[in-house]
Amino acid sequence: MTEDSRVEELVYIMKKVGLNLTAQIDCCLGNQELSGVQTYFLVYFLRHHPEGTYLTEVCQMLSMVVVMISMSLASVRRISEVLSEKADIHDPENAVKEVKDGRIDFNHVNFSYKHGSGKNALSDINLHIKSGETIGVIGGTGAGKSSLVNLICRLYDVDEGSVCVGGVDVRKYDTEVLRNQVSVVLQKNTLFSGTILDNLRWGNPDATYEECVEACKAACADEFIDRMPGGYETRIERGGANVSGGQKQRLCIARALLKKPKILILDDSTSAVDTATDAKIRAAFAKEIPGTTKIIIAQRLSSVESADRILVLDNGRIDDFDTPENLLAHNAIYQEIHHSQMEGGGDFDQPA
Ligand SMILES: Nc1ncnc2c1ncn2[C@@H]1O[C@H](COP(=O)(O)OP(=O)(O)OP(=O)(O)O)[C@@H](O)[C@H]1O
Ligand SMILES: [Mg+2]
């Protein structure tokens, strides 16, 4: 058999099993001229593995490797794009390195995601929160709840007005110092592959075992961790695949507590936790971290009913800011949610 006919035979086998190895190599290496390399591969395999089935397996494996390389190259390109992106937020010279307390002041803030677009995500927000207060935030989808808390840790800068933390404009802080004192727990937080302790210490690498256990107790995570075979050494799979949504949320709250922040923000982060556990977590906050300012964004009214005050946002504006009792007595939006959730157990966006 000549070398050419061996190659033809191999190509025939590959087509039969639906493989197009040469095309994938081309794609992966940027459509370069590779006919010499391709021929070498084909002839090599044909010479050394004349059995068709074995050869097919080898080709399948090679094909998978090539596909994985091409996917990895695409990811590397995307990651380097993100890494080379210039940040919009810059620290000032002589940045403030200490956050005194958890006081928060919004002074007539206007904010839009696209400056000058005329479409404000937040309009004329004038808000004063005392250090250690527990504040509930409610409002429909797109009302501006997440945008409001994103300004506290300076993920974005305001268009007009100012946001102050501990009496200092957030633009004057060293952003790392500021963000270490403002812990945000999102609805969907990420857990990494590693033990539970590894994941907790991502919030504070110096946290002792005892501190981790304390934080888990406050976040009501200790009860399910104790039931796990490896306890705090149990391995969490990538993305937290082996824990439930509610368990993941509680681990993320514990992780945020380990930072010992002056401000703790829960952005809809107990949505997957049952109502009784949610209440236990809030009671633990009141007992364990009384000096920390707590901002709780929730769709479920029961999550904010014990707050000192509740902020009602509507279409990027403050509709009201008062105690739960006063809101129930006079605020139409609050009354509507209250009645709809009392009657039907629905959330904010469900009509009564
Ligand atoms: N990254 C962004 N870029 C552009 N516009 C955004 C961005 N994030 C939010 N918005 C817009 O800003 C407005 C407020 O959004 P925000 O996420 O603050 O609402 P929300 O009250 O948190 O809603 P939800 O309850 O759905 O989380 C919405 O009109 C939204 O479309
Ligand atoms: Mg939101």
Image: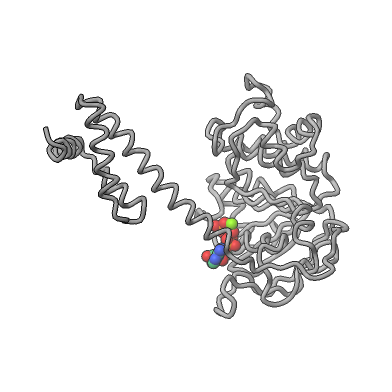
Pick the front one: 217 or 33 = 33
The spot of residue 156 in percent (x, y) is 66, 66
The spot of residue 250 in percent (x, y) is 66, 37
Pick the front one: 221 or 350 = 221
The colouring scheme, among rainbow, by chain, secondary structure or one colour, is: one colour
Which quarter of the rendered image does ligand 2 occupy? bottom right
Whether residue 237 appears in this view of the structure is yes
Which residue sits furthest right?
A: 100
How many numbered markers are drawn?
0
The spot of residue 267 in percent (x, y) is 64, 52
Residue under the point 26% across and 27% down: 48
Residue under the point 25% across and 25% down: 54
Q: Is residue 241 above or below residue 352?
A: above
Residue under the point 28% across and 34% down: 59
Residue under the point 68% across and 67% down: 89
Q: Quadrant of the N terminus?
A: top left
Pick the front one: 104 or 136 = 104
Q: Is residue 254 above or below residue 114?
A: above
The spot of residue 278 in percent (x, y) is 67, 39
Quadrant of res 173: bottom right
